[in-house]
Amino acid sequence: MLTIFRRNKRLVDLFNNFIDIHCHIMPGIDDGAKNVEASYYLIKKAQSLGITGFIGTPHVMADLYPNTPQTIGASFDELKEHLLQQKVELSWLGVAAEYQIDSEFEVLLNNKNLLFLHENYILVELPFLQVPMNVERIVQQLIDNGYQPILAHPERYRYFHQQKHVLDVLKNMGCKLQVNALSLSQYYGKSIHKMALDLVEENYIDFIATDMHHQQHLANITEIMLNKKIEKNIEELVHDTKSIFC
């Protein structure tokens, strides 16, 4: 009796007219694209994978990348001009930021000096060493101000691997969670890979994005084969990301 085994689906097979809501393609202002030529390469390579829209999200960190709407806007203008010269057509090109919840974020929040992914959606991240003591208060402030926080790559914060209950609290408050595509492989390590699969399978995750910084990220994303247990979940995440941000 002949048994036919279905081949695992590649992640990029789902990226048809996808919009990447978390990527570091803005030239020269964080640890992503170093110049406009690098930005162009990332965008063209991502297009070949089916990603047709981008929201650039440069880091905003008080001590390392103290970006402002002005510095981000200038980088965005440079990128738009270069893409226009190169006749690159995209379904969408926008700009926002990835805000670290650090000592200065509350000042930005109080001053309402923030950039959004779409409407009221704002992308935030946490320090990697320890969860900030004020994270719940900040998330509540965001929600009270009418903003929809999205926590970037919760699977990458190793303290959540032992303190998953904190994610439960944030989710119950109304915070959305975004998984990195690379976390569906072992690119960041086995424990982060396992955490990502667990969060996806248990329906913690709301959105998916690349978080690409350089060409190696995209090269690795092309090799990701989906675990059959979560394939349907990932299809739904891709669909939900497109439906809100396209």
Image (cartoon, rainbow, N blue to C red):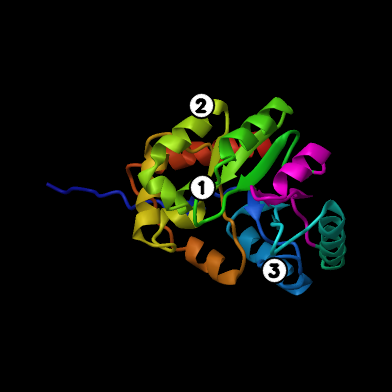
Q: Count residues near mark 2 (Cα–Cα under 10 Å), then give few for <14, some for 14-19, many for 20+.
A: few
Q: Nearer the viewer, residue 54 or 198?
A: 198
Are the residues flagged by discs 1 and 3 in contact, CB closer than 8 Å? Answer: no
Q: In the picture, which quadrant includes the C terminus?
A: top right
Q: Is residue 26 left or right of residue 235?
A: right
Label 1: state its secondary structure.
Answer: loop
Mark carried by residue 230: none
Q: Count residues near mark 1 (Cα–Cα under 10 Å), then give few for <14, some for 14-19, many for 20+.
A: some
Q: Does the magenta portion include 105?
A: yes
Q: Is residue 97 left or right of residue 125?
A: right
| Residue in the image at 53% along x and 36% along y | 206
**Mark 3 = which residue?**
33
| Residue in the image at 43% along x and 34% along y | 203
Q: Does the magenta portion include 197?
A: no
Residue 214 is situated, as x and y percent measured from the top left of the image, at 61, 69
Specify the amino acid type for callout 3.
Ala
Mark carried by residue 131: 1
| Residue in the image at 66% along x and 66% along y | 32
Q: N-terminal of the two: label 1 or label 3?
A: 3
Residue 68 is situated, as x and y percent measured from the top left of the image, at 82, 54
Q: N-terminal of the two: label 1 or label 2?
A: 1
Q: Which residues are magenta?
A: 88-113
Q: Nearer the viewer, mark 1 or mark 2?
A: 1
Q: Nearer the viewer, residue 79 or 101?
A: 101
Cα separation, mark 1 vs mark 2, equals: 17 Å
**Mark 2 = which residue?**
172
